[in-house]
Image (cartoon, rainbow, N blue to C red):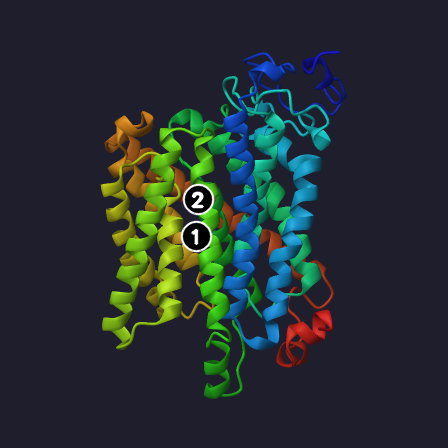
Amino acid sequence: PDLHTSHTLLSHTPFDMPEWTETAPWPQPNCDAIDAGTTAWMMTCMALVLFMTPGLAFFYGGLVHRKSVLTIIMQCIISMGLIAILWLIIGFSLAFGQSGGGFIGNPDSYFMLWNLDPCTPVGFPMQSGPGNYPGLLFAGYQMMFAIICPALITGAFADRVKFEAYLIFITVWLLLVYCPFAHWVWNPEGFLGKWGVKDFAGGIVVHISAGMAALASIFVVGNRKFDSEEEREAAHTPHNRTFVALGTGMLWFGWFGFNGGSALAADGIAVFAIVNSSIACAMAMFCWVCIEWVHIGKPTLVGACVGAIAGLATITPCAGFVRPWAAFVIGWVASWFCYGCVMLRDVFHWDDALDVWAVHGMGGWIGSLLLGLLADEGVAGQARGGEFFAKQLAATFLCAAYSFVVSFAILKIIDIVMPGGVRPSDEDIKMGLDLSMHGE
């Protein structure tokens, strides 16, 4: 039977969901339609994006106290296992399956990816038109995005969340926040994408979603507790700056696949995306160091690394829509804006331990707005303008509010239902979660 007829496992049950959009025929196996060059590029980018998650583990691991370094690395690494399984079973279908009113995908569309193979090119419903690389590869590439996104959140509640609570949270969060965002923006039938909202590689889908979830988490989990100012200082001092620098290098390298691969082709747009990413990263890193030098009197390695990540997060929604001069401006804005958000976090006493909200959430937010002001029609067909900016502004506020509210609700419910709540005992925290929770 052809692939289209195999998508009806649930279509005639009494529990039918909304009518699933059927605007084009499903692609059929055709090895002649597969381009080796594009396929090789997308396979490389898939590997690069996966490489970012261990990079994030090193980055976060170097920033936390030595008593919880293995805990936060474990939280990143386990996402590579759990999220991949969820993506295989239902996540990819919810994000890129047949659309139900532009809000969510049919969970039956790609169940277990059983109806995808290396000879079936990408096409409806995951993409609006036929492509020249396998749809199975597109599913794998998008899996890498799904893996790193929940791992980003862990930096906010470092040192103070039970492992079992974390597993439940990222499971539910993927299904209720990440997959809907990916569907709204990146599915060809998603309501935000059809309205004209653009997000080249995840400023909204990845960074705003994770950043606002991070902010919500600190209101449920609460701040860290310290018996003395010396203890507070020790907890806020990175235990291994070498890990931070190593993680930054791995993330910067992997981001070429994150942003460059989002062109979904080895073409000029991919070139723009990669070059722009490096320019914005470099500019934000250097400016962050200068700001810090003036502010605290010394330039620090950790500051340079955090500035680089701020630049990368901010350029992500814009990477394939702007020219290099605009990437330069975006990097400059990222350093000032995200540094200011870090200061604001201190004013409000939000214990976002590793600045996930300030760097990723607000970086993705300001980058999505700058896209409305700096997009160049000659790069990828999207022109800047007031109407486009207004749509970007509305989408960022909608998605930020949705992620915050739903993330807060998920964690609050887990906190109420789980014996002892999501937070370990004070004794376990004082001992260090590496030992008390993982026995390592």
The CA distance from mark 1 to mark 2 is: 7 Å
> Of 419 and 257, which appears nearest the observer?
257
Q: Quadrant of residue 438?
A: bottom right
> Of 153 and 237, which appears nearest the observer?
237
Q: Position of residue 55 (x, y in %)?
A: 53, 57
Tell me the kind of residue under disc 2.
Answer: Phe
Task: From the image, tell me which residue sits under label 2.
Answer: 256
The answer to whether one can see residue 273 in this image is yes
Task: From the image, tell me which residue sits under label 1.
Answer: 252
In the visual, does 58 lie left or right of 291?
right
In the visual, does 394 lie left or right of 176?
left
Q: Residue at horizontal 32%, vertical 43%?
A: 276
Discs 1, 2 touching: Cβ within 8 Å: yes
Q: Position of residue 7 (x, y in %)?
A: 70, 19
Mark 1 surroundings within 10 Å by alpha-carbon count, few (fewer than 14), some (14 through 19), many (20 or more) = many
Q: Residue at horizontal 68%, vertical 49%?
A: 81
> Of 391 and 324, which appears nearest the observer?
324
Q: Quadrant of residue 89?
A: top right
Mark 2 surroundings within 10 Å by alpha-carbon count, few (fewer than 14), some (14 through 19), many (20 or more) = many
Tell me the kind of residue under disc 1.
Answer: Trp
Q: Position of residue 391 (x, y in %)?
A: 34, 33
Q: Residue at horizontal 27%, vertical 30%?
A: 387
The answer to whether one can see residue 352 in this image is no
- Residue 371: image tag: none
**SS for tag 1?**
helix
**SS for tag 2?**
helix
Q: Position of residue 239 (x, y in %)?
A: 51, 76
Q: Quadrant of the N terminus?
A: top right
Q: Is 205 drawn above or below residue 188 in the view shown?
A: below
Q: Is 21 drawn above or below residue 67 in the view shown?
A: above
Q: Is 191 drawn above or below residue 331 in the view shown?
A: above
